[in-house]
Amino acid sequence: MTPRPTLRDRWRATALHRSIVRTPPLDSPRGRALHAFGNVFLHLYPVRVPRALLALRSTWRLGFVSTVLFAILAITGIYLMFFYTPAVTFAYGDMQALRTQVGFGQLIRNVHRWAGHLMVIAVVLHLVRVFVDGAYKAPRQFNWVIGVLLLLVTLAWSFTGYLLPWDQLAYWAVTVGSDLLHYVPVVGGTLRDFLLGGTAIGQAALRRFYVIHVAVLTLAFLVLMAVHIWRVRKDGLAVGDPPVAHDPAAPARETALAFADAVAEVAEAAPAAASRGGARVLGHVPRDEAPLARPRDPDDEVFTWPHLIVRHQVVALATCALVLAMGVAFEAPLRELANPSVTPEPAKAPWYFVGLQELLAHFDPLVAGVLIPTALVGALVMLPYVDRNPSRRPRDRRVALTVFWLLFGALVALTVVGAFFRGPGWAFVPPWVQLYFEP
Amino acid sequence: MPSRPAYVVPDPAQAELTRRELLQAGWKVGGGLLALAAGWTTIEALRPLAATGGGATLTLAPPDAYADGAASYVREGRLWITRRGATLHALAQKCPHLGCAVPFCEASGRFECPCHGSIYDVEGTWIAGPAPRGMDRHPLQVVDGRVVVNTAILEEGAPLGTPSRAPGRDGRCAPAAEG
């Protein structure tokens, strides 16, 4: 006697369901592969991933956490847009109304603020993890560069959002942060005036920061993130790579040679087709294979669905739970209305720029405010092209790792000193005497 | 079968510019022009308005209203009027270091920046801290017995190393900066 079909079975048998989910059931390897392959959202993942990726310590899921935080920020940000006017006469009142009139308004604002800070931390830690694992090496050099751009977008996002509450904290942190620009030789003052829409922060600056925050950076981030994830999917995950590449250029060269052979072959067989612009020649390159993808041992791979997906679901839920708990426990700060005549003491830049501010107290502004940050970003961008060491083993990369940890340690130290050990007039005040820090 | 006129392939060696080269160059030029138009439009649209930077000519109190060694704040111009001896100064409140509003400290008789601890005397001359020069100033005149300040013009402050002519008082407002 066959069991009676359940409601779920009957729903799955309908033409409607089969028009939505067009792949076989997920209880077979074929179904799982086709599900990952035919679903636009799961298509962000490879069909199979290295088995080593299933361990949390393989990546600490930091890139994925950044993406989840982006989603949280997008959703809470849309909520906030319903209650916010980017005008100097309304912005501060809107922030107060969020607290006093909008149901759960303050909670949404808290979650947005803490998720923004956490995203800066997650993206930086992701960069650290990728560096320490040597995952930026060939063929992934350019995806590292995209990642650096995503970090810059994240910082710009946080910085532009910082101004929007239009309180004393926002006004003066952004004044100090944007005034750094005028130390750029020749064009600096013009750059700052273009960013602010004037010589001082006012209505034009607030509107510009708002549009950059909600529209320009969002679009830039989405495009960059699509390329970033697409390339991870095409190049495969570095976790599954051998620790030493024999010759990073070899696969590329082989592919190029094979391509040249194919062109020559087609040109010989069909000269007319070849002279018509080579459209048919391109058809000989397999469309869905990355030129640099290596064959893997199938035994070292698992299906993305369900093995990686369920792990990602757990991480996503944990991330949501963390920002929600932070939003319930800690209030986003709101000081007095912005007052262009009075600078509060001390006026600190947002915490991720406070290391720069600390540096400014010791060096010439051109050096500390312009040359050092430019050199740091330039070094990050150039890193995969300068460091051509094919090995990903720590013992083969002593110089790279030492330099990286020294610079990263210096940045963390400057940030901690600037954030927690500075008081009015930038004097040294330990946090156990008096804490001058607002996130 | 009717014969078609044979398609004569032009000899690339004879042609100065083939059709393909013309089209290839054409779309690059077109793309370049479009980028130029987009860039020009963007720059013109985002050009800051001059009016947002102040620019009004302010008519203030008679010169006698400003006491020697004191500073009084003019909110509408975001500037300070100070006097040393017979000389009046109109000093912009914006610190030349990183743009904080510099308050006047009555206890020390000096301007002390709360952000990074730059200190200026009552004439805006640099005394200490990380600022690159003295406080910036607006031209000040006395017209019909009243102080008139043109905020449209901002002159750079005195360079570092200019000796201070105004002695301060003993007090301090902010603790001394480390840097």
Image (spheres, coloured by chain):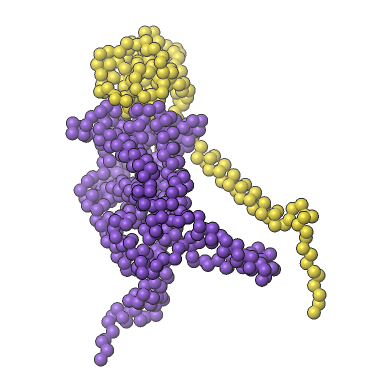
Of A1 and B169, which appears nearest the observer? A1
Count of numbered tags:
0
Quadrant of the image containing the C terminus of chain A: top left
Query: In the figure, is residue A167 to the left or right of B156?
Result: left
The residue drawn where x is 35% and y is 39% is A407
Regarding residue A18, the answer to whether it shows in the image is yes
The residue drawn where x is 34% and y is 19% is B128
Regarding residue A155, the answer to whether it shows in the image is no
Of A51 and B26, which appears nearest the observer? A51
The residue drawn where x is 36% and y is 67% is A301
User: Is residue A168 positioned above or below A113 on the image?
Assistant: above
On the image, the x and y values in percent for residue A354 come to 32, 36
Asked which quadrant contains residue A409, the reply is: top left
Which chain is drawn using yellow?
A: B
User: Is residue B142 positioned above or below A304 on the image?
Assistant: above
Of B177 and A59, which appears nearest the observer? A59
On the image, the x and y values in percent for residue B56 come to 45, 25
Asked which quadrant contains residue B175, the reply is: top left
Residue ranking furthest to the top: B85
Asked which quadrant contains residue A269, the reply is: bottom right
The residue drawn where x is 31% and y is 32% is A347
Quadrant of the image containing the N terminus of chain A: bottom left
Of B155 and A98, which appears nearest the observer? B155
Query: In the figure, is residue B121 to the left or right of A431?
Result: right
Residue ranking furthest to the bottom: A1
Which chain is drawn using purple?
A: A
